[in-house]
Amino acid sequence: MYRISELTNQVGLSRTALLYYEKLGLIKGQRQANGYRLYSALDVEQVKFIQQLQLGGLSLKECKTCLAHQVDKEMLKQRLAKLDEEILQKQQAREMLAAMAGLNAEVNEQSWHQKAIHDTPKAHFNWLLTQGFSEKEAFRMKWLSKNMTQHDQYMADFMHVFDGLERWGPGGESETLHALSLLTSKPKRVLEIGCGKGLATKVLAQHLKAEITAVDNEETALASVKQMLQSQPKVKLKSSVKTLCATMTDLPFEPNSFDMIWAESSAYIMGVENALTAWKPLLTDNGLLVFSDLVLLTNKPSKDVTAHWQKDYPDIQTIETRRKQIAKAGYQLIADFTYQQASWDNYYLPLQQRINELSTGMKGSQALADLSREVEFYLKYQKEYGYQMFAAQFKL
Ligand SMILES: C[S@@+](CC[C@H](N)C(=O)[O-])C[C@H]1O[C@@H](n2cnc3c(N)ncnc32)[C@H](O)[C@@H]1O
């Protein structure tokens, strides 16, 4: 038999709490002649039993009902659903802490980053910056590696694949020319953002009489642009081209500096809506903005496609939604069109070939496996998503 002070030690509850248990009839102390109450081993077990039920989310009154009557199965089912939800939340919180602590073996770090990028993109991005990642690295982690501990290796592999390729995204000369044919004026000062190795830069320089500034934050890409320009017969280039290594989020130009901005498959990096707003001040009134973006070609994508882009491009939109965003940001859409199959072939066929060439030497590379999966996924689901070119004009 136990005194109440001993019972409190056994079960870790206060005296007041135990007296309340007693008042509810959950335990039954036997009053002694000296006025003390004594509790049995059964009371100890009873309290521990109730504590388990409480951990499951039952109130004391519900515990009492469970113990005194036949269990209320409906009530328990509801509690179970709530408990499952709480367990999931705790699991996610645990994964977050483990990922932050770099305990990579314990947790699928990629999935944590994916979730954070989707649910709390700005906070996650800022947090990466506070962890010492540069903006460039943080963007790369967002779009490419999604893994803090293996980021360097992933990026080295990724760049190794792409260094050997001309094209870093779907596209083609015919798409660039088609977009140029839509323009409502002849631009003289052009800013190209995220120019990569300069495939579109070349077409622009051959067909426009303008001063073109080609910006990218990758020095190796800009070196290729310069090389490509030098190899061009001078007569073919109607424009002069300058290159600049800078980030698209903080472009070092005065307001109204350009009468056209060109961004083939690069606006997504900072988010299309952000880009529409952030780049606008750089344009003159009636200035042109041409950009391309990955879009959903259906309002009802399959589960596989939804899950895939949730992971790799959570901000993917339908063409209609992008049109609305363009209007909302203060531009007037001139026209838009979907890339031809050939533009995807231009990107994926050399990529697939490069993956095949590298597969023996880069066995076990996560970056190579991801790129290979990306190509296979496209071949299977190409009807549901595509690339869209948008040409718009800024109106004051
Ligand atoms: C998908 S590639 C597209 C390249 C090229 N426009 C094309 O269509 O082939 C995206 C380009 O944006 C560049 N980029 C990534 N982050 C950037 C940033 N913060 N500022 C400027 N350029 C960036 C990359 O280096 C890359 O060249």
Image (spheres, grey):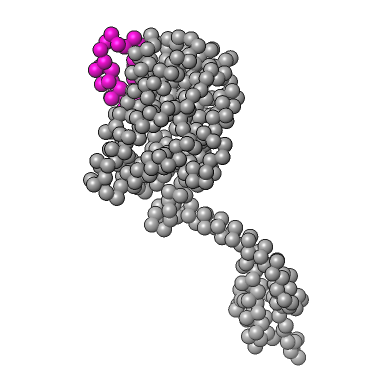
- The residue most toward the bottom is 33
Q: In which quarter of the image is residue 359?
A: top left
Viewer-proximal residue among 10 and 76: 76
Instruction: Confirm whether the magenta stretch covers residue 229.
Output: yes
Mark yes or no: residue 276 visible: yes
Residue at 46% over, 49% down: 111
Pinpoint residue 105: horizontal percent, then vertical percent. Answer: 38, 57
Number of numbered discs on residues: 0
* Quadrant for the C terminus in the image: top right
Magenta region, residue range: 221-245
Residue at 38% over, 16% down: 204
Viewer-proximal residue among 263 and 306: 306
Residue at 66% over, 65% down: 77
* Quadrant for the N terminus in the image: bottom right
Instruction: Confirm whether the magenta stretch covers residue 143.
Output: no
Residue at 56% over, 26% down: 323
Pinpoint residue 119: horizontal percent, then vertical percent. Answer: 54, 44
Q: In which quarter of the image is residue 154?
A: top left
Left or right, 213 with respect to 278, comes to left
Pinpoint residue 253: horizontal percent, then vertical percent. Answer: 44, 18
Pinpoint residue 86: horizontal percent, then vertical percent. Answer: 59, 59
Mark yes or no: residue 279 visible: no
Viewer-proximal residue among 312 and 356: 356
Q: In this view, does 392 lie above or below 315?
A: above
